């Protein structure tokens, strides 16, 4: 799909980093706007939950076809088109005055983020393939940094009196500036007009998707349930419940920013083994402790352990030969993203049938699939 010269250059690395950063800013920009949308539309929590399904629906609908689009038009075109979709969707999310407008904006927003997620990872795999050292975790670390900038920046603007319109424009400008700098630096593709849009995941890709599903399931559960676990099981005041997710997020961001050195030192298989074991141990610690400080240490371990699992899985998806790279990453991303969507519901069902700690114990067991399957997932001898 690309020319024979090296894909790993300072320019292509910068373009990839900026893509992940822009995607992080875009994905996080919606979070500070949720309370405003709820109040503006005068809806209850149940209707808000239904509305939020539109975001996931948009992503799931587009992700399977994104690989085919990349095969036909290249990752650069898909990333830039996704950036345009984000710019078109955000004003509707910030100021849409009806359920229909906000719902359609969320579908477009989710579709844009889903397409960008696949395309930037395909680009990252192609750049890393020619790199002398691992670089995938660093790319994913920039997504986390972008999330902090997007959510924190818009929240700060709103807190200091900026209008929704001004805050929205600021988010769009950050994404647009990042992609504008990246645009001339992307890899040049050789489009394939015969590339299929969607194929059924097979071979190693199916296993990689399952492992991504489990990891994203854990991440989604920590996002949605960690505060409740801290307040109900450990008697932490409600105002302090969010500290658990903050600890997890910081650990994951730092883990990814230093992750390339860890992968270079240990090798991808050992990273999967150690990462899965550390994350599972963190979940077990959260379940069996009665001390808030120990629970926070558990969430720290979850973040550290899980931080580099998904970047390694993306690298492996680019190295397998049972499917074309774009289609493989699209399939893996779709399966993995289902974990984020299913996470809150799965944990809720188990918590209702048993207890919330029991649900986290289930996650600890599921996370052990990562080290158990590490040898097959990497399919290469340890360095």
Image (cartoon, rainbow, N blue to C red):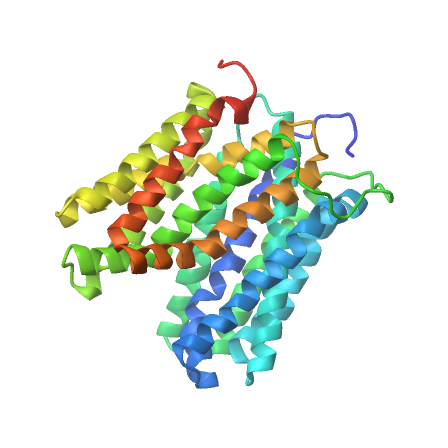
The answer to whether residue 76 is left or right of residue 125 is right
Q: How many labels does the image show?
A: 0
Name the residue located 62 percent from the left edge and 45 percent from the top edge.
120
Name the residue located 28 percent from the left edge and 35 percent from the top edge.
281
Q: Nearer the viewer, residue 62 or 137?
A: 62
- Image coordinates of residue 230 in percent, x first then y, are 21, 56
The answer to whether residue 173 is left or right of residue 37 is right
The relative height of residue 34 versus residue 175 in the rendered view (above or below) is below
- Image coordinates of residue 15 in percent, x first then y, are 62, 43
Residue 14 figure quarter: top right
The relative height of residue 45 versus residue 242 in the rendered view (above or below) is below
Residue 162 visible here: no
The answer to whether residue 185 is left or right of residue 190 is left
Q: From the image, which quarter does the N terminus lie in?
A: top right
Q: Which of 328 and 72 is in front in this view?
A: 328
Residue 292 visible here: yes
- Image coordinates of residue 201 in percent, x first then y, are 66, 40
Q: Nearer the viewer, residue 274 or 30?
A: 274
Q: Nearer the viewer, residue 261 or 48?
A: 48
Determine the residue located farthest toward the front in the rendered image.
353
The relative height of residue 293 versus residue 137 in the rendered view (above or below) is below
Residue 243 figure quarter: bottom left
Name the residue located 59 percent from the left edge and 63 percent from the top edge.
57
Name the residue located 39 percent from the left edge and 43 percent from the top edge.
253
- Image coordinates of residue 312 in percent, x first then y, are 51, 32
């Amino acid at each position: 799909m690309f020319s024979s010269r090296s894909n790993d250059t300072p320019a292509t690395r910068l373009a990839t980093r900026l893509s992940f950063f822009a995607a992080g800013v875009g994905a996080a920009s919606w979070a500070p706007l949720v309370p405003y949308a709820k109040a503006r539309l005068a809806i209850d929590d149940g209707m808000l939950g239904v509305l939020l399904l539109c975001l996931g629906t948009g992503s799931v609908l587009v992700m399977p076809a994104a690989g085919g689009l990349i095969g036909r038009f290249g990752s650069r075109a898909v990333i830039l088109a996704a950036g345009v979709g984000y710019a078109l969707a955000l004003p509707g999310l910030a100021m849409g005055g009806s359920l229909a407008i906000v719902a359609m904006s969320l579908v477009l927003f989710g579709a844009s983020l889903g397409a960008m997620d696949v395309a930037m990872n395909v680009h990252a795999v192609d750049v890393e393939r020619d790199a002398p050292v691992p670089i995938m975790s660093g790319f994913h670390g920039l997504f986390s940094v972008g999330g902090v900038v997007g959510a924190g920046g818009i929240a700060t603007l709103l807190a200091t009196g900026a209008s929704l319109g001004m805050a929205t424009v600021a988010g769009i400008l950050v994404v647009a500036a990042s992609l504008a700098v990246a645009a001339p630096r992307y890899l040049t593709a050789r489009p394939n007009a015969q590339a299929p849009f969607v194929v059924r995941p097979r071979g190693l890709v199916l296993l990689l998707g399952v492992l991504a599903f489990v990891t994203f399931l854990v991440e989604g559960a920590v996002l949605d349930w960690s505060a409740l676990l801290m307040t109900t099981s450990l008697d932490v005041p409600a105002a302090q419940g969010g500290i658990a997710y903050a600890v997890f997020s910081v650990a994951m961001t730092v883990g990814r920013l230093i992750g390339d050195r860890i992968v270079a030192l240990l090798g991808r298989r050992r990273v999967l083994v150690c990462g899965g074991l550390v994350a599972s141990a963190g979940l077990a610690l959260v379940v069996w402790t009665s001390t808030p400080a120990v629970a926070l240490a558990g969430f720290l371990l979850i973040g550290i352990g899980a931080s580099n699992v998904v970047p390694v899985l993306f690298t492996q998806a680019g190295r397998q030969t049972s499917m074309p790279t774009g289609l493989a990453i699209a399939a893996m991303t779709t399966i993995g993203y289902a974990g984020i969507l299913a996470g809150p519901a799965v944990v809720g069902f188990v918590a209702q049938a048993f207890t919330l700690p029991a649900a986290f114990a289930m996650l600890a067991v599921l996370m052990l699939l990562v080290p158990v399957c590490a040898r097959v997932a990497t399919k290469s001898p340890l360095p």
